Image: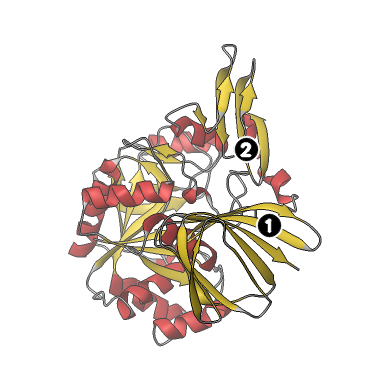
Amino acid sequence: MQIVLLSGGSGKRLWPLSNDIRSKQFIKIFKTETGDYESMVQRVYRQICKVDANSKVTIATSETQVSAIHNQLGNAVGISVEPCRRDTFPAIALATAYLHDVMGVREDEAVVVCPVDPYVEDDYFAALKQLSDLAEKGTANLTLMGIEPTYPSEKYGYIIPEGKEQVSVVRTFKEKPTEEVAKQYIAEGALWNGGVFAYKLGYVLNRAHELIDFTDYNDLFAKYETLTKISFDYAVVEHEKSIAVMRFRGQWKDLGTWNTLVEAMDEPTMGKAILNDQCQNVHVINELDVPVLCMGLKDVIVSASAEGILVSEIEQSSAIKPYVDHLDQPIMFAEKSWGEYHVLDVQSGSKTLKLNMKAGGQMDSQCQAEKSRVWTILSGEGVATINGKAQSVKAGDVLSFAQGTSYGLTAQTALSLIETVVF
C-alpha cells in the first residue's frame, strides 16, 4: 500500500507546546506500552506498519518539518518537500510526481492520501487498505473514505452518498453547515469528509499535467512557487464525476485544539506536576524542568514549555489562536535530525542554547558559521570537525570558532553541549 501523509500546519492552537516549526503532530503526548511517549506522527506510522508491514509511506511536508520527521521516524519514510505552501492540490500533485519519477511507482498502482495526525485505532488503517484495494480495481477515479458522524458537527464538510451501502456513489458534497443543517444531512446518511481518499497514480498525475504546465517532478519542484494556491477538493474533486465513498464506522478524532487533545491523554499530567485533592478535571503538560503546582482548580488546562505558559478553562482553550497570533516570540525549542535544541538565553549580543544530540547524530561538517560560536561539552563523546580537521571531544572540552568557519559534529554517544552564539 502506497500512503501519502499530508503534514502541514503551524503551532497556533496548541501553543505553547507547538510553534511555527513544531506542529501538533510532533508533540510527544501519547503513552506507549513501554511507558515512553510518542507523537501523533509516530503513532500513525507505527499503526500503519502494524496493519501492513509492506506499506510505503511518503510524507508531503514543508522544509521546516523535515528535520523533525527524520528525528522521530528516521529515514524509513519518503519525504516530498514543498518549497513553499501552496495548499493541498499542488502538494498532492508534487507528491504524486515524486512517487512516479523518484520512487518509480507505476501509474496503475493505487495511492492513499490522508492527514498525518488523526487520532484513530488500528481498524482505520485496515480500512485504508480496503480503500487502496477499491482504487486498485478502478471502479471509480476517486474513492473517498466517509466518516460515520457521531454528532452534527459544524467543523467538517459532508459527503452525501446515493445510498447507505458500505460503498456507494457520491451524490454531492456540502460545505461546513450549521448544527441544524448538519442534523438534516446525517438523517440523509451523510458522512464527514475527513480528507481521506485513494486513486490510481496515473489519474492524479494526468490531472496535474492538465492543470499545470510541467514535464516531470524536478520541473514541477522548480516551478512550485509560481503555482496557484488551491485545494484538492476545488481543483479535482468538484470536477470529477466518477467518485465513490466507503463508510468508516470506527473511532476518528481530529485533535486540533487543547480541549480535544486532553480527551486523548492517558494520564492527567505529564512532566513535573502536582495536583491537590481539590482539583477536578485538571490536565497539566509540563516540559520545563521545574514543578507546576495546582490547587483547587476545576476544568483547567495548564501547559508550560520554553515558548510560554498557558492556563485556561478547558472550553475556552479552543479560542487561543487570535491571542497567539499577536505574540512575537522567537523559536525556543526545535527538533533536528541529530537531536534537539533549547534556547536558554537571548541577549543583545549573544544567544545561548543547549543541544542534545542522539548517539549517531550528525551535524553536516559543511556548515558555515554565520557568527562566532563557543561549544562547551557537558556530557558524552563525539568528533568535531573544524575547517576539515577532526578532533575528539568529551565532557569538559571547550571549542571556539570564528565566523566563516566550516564546522560539524558527530555524537558517538548521547551528547549534550552548550552553544553560545556571539552576534
Cβ atoms at labels 2 and 1 below 8 Å apart: no
Residue 338 placement (x, y as % from top left): 46, 62
Say left or right for 343 vs 259.
right
Q: Residues within 10 Å of mark 1 (few under 14, many from 20)?
A: some
Badge 2 marks a residue whose secondary structure is strand
Rendered position, 83 above or below 120:
below
Regarding residue 88, the answer to whether it shows in the image is: no
Residue 375 appears in which quarter of the rendering? Answer: bottom right
Vertical side of 380 occupied by 249: above or below: above
| Disc 1: which residue | 352
In this view, 96 is above or below 159: below
Answer yes or no: is residue 215 visible: yes
Q: Is residue 24 left or right of residue 294?
A: left
Q: Judge left or right: residue 93 versus residue 176.
A: left
Q: Quadrant of the C terminus?
A: bottom right
Q: Position of residue 283 (x, y in %)?
A: 55, 27
Q: CA distance from mark 2 to mark 1?
A: 20 Å
State the image quarter where residue 419 is shown: bottom right
Q: Which residue is mark 2?
A: 304
Foreground residue among 114 and 388: 388
Give coordinates of residue 79: x percent, y percent.
40, 67
Q: Residue at x 42, y 38 (%)?
A: 30
Residue type at tag 2: Ala
- Tell me which residue sits at (63%, 43%) in the image: 16
In the structure shown, which secondary structural element does the residue marked by tag 1 occupy? strand
Q: Residue furthest top?
A: 278
